[in-house]
Amino acid sequence: MRFCYLFSMLLLVSCYEPERNCTDFKTGTFEFEAVVGTEVLTTTFVRNDSIEIDYFRGKADTSTVRWINDCEYIVKKKNPKNRSEEKAIHMKILTTGANEYLFEYNVVGEARKQKGTAKKVK
């Protein structure tokens, strides 16, 4: 009896898929906070289907957006100022909520990945 109960619970837990309504976050205005040293810095970005404009410390920067599928896209600076900015970033939405999403990102071709949360404000 216990084995059947345990097996049923494992089966239910293993079937759990996090919510991913990625299309809700393809366009809009978002905020992303990052801790740099001891400071919490906020970036605001506005994204339509193919362009993303980042606003950080009073400056705007435009990137192109190429969607791979509903939950993954590539971001590339439109006017890079140095070699580092020429590199494309792969973004993957992992989970979504009512007004925010958890994402994973890395420089295309590099293995090191980082995570962040973006909040939809409009």
Image (cartoon, grey):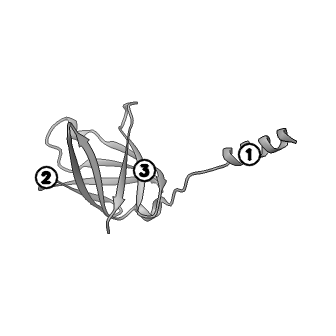
- Which residue is most to the top? 111
Vertical side of 4 occupied by 60: above or below: below
Name above or below for residue 111 compared with residue 80. above
Element under disc 1 = helix
Q: Are marks 2 and 3 in contact (CB under 8 Å)?
A: no
Helix, strand or loop status at disc 3: strand
Residue drawn where x is 27% and y is 45% of the image? 34
Quadrant for residue 30, please give it: bottom left
The residue where tag 3 is placed is: 102
Q: Nearer the viewer, residue 7 or 86?
A: 7
Q: Quadrant of the C terminus?
A: bottom left
Left/right placement of residue 12 relative to residue 36 reads right
Q: Position of residue 41 (x, y in %)?
A: 21, 48
Residue annotated with mark 1: 9
Q: Which numbered disc, 1 or 3, marks the residue closer to the eye?
A: 1
Percent across and percent down for residue 9 are 74, 45
Check disc 2 and give the amino acid type: Arg
Q: Residue at x 36, y 64 (%)?
A: 27
Q: Amino acid at mark 1?
A: Met
Q: Nearer the viewer, mark 2 or mark 1?
A: 1
- Label 2 belongs to which residue? 57
Q: CA distance from mark 2 to mark 3?
A: 23 Å
Give the residue type at disc 3. Leu
Numbered tag placed on residue 31 in the rendering: none
Quarter of the view holding residue 104 = top left
* Residue nearer the viewer, 65 or 96: 96
Mark 2 element type: loop
> Which one is earlier in the sequence, the residue at label 2 or at label 1?
1
Marks 2,1: beta carbons within 8 A: no
The picture places residue 1, in percent across and down from the top left corner, at: 88, 42
Q: Is residue 44 left or right of residue 99?
A: left
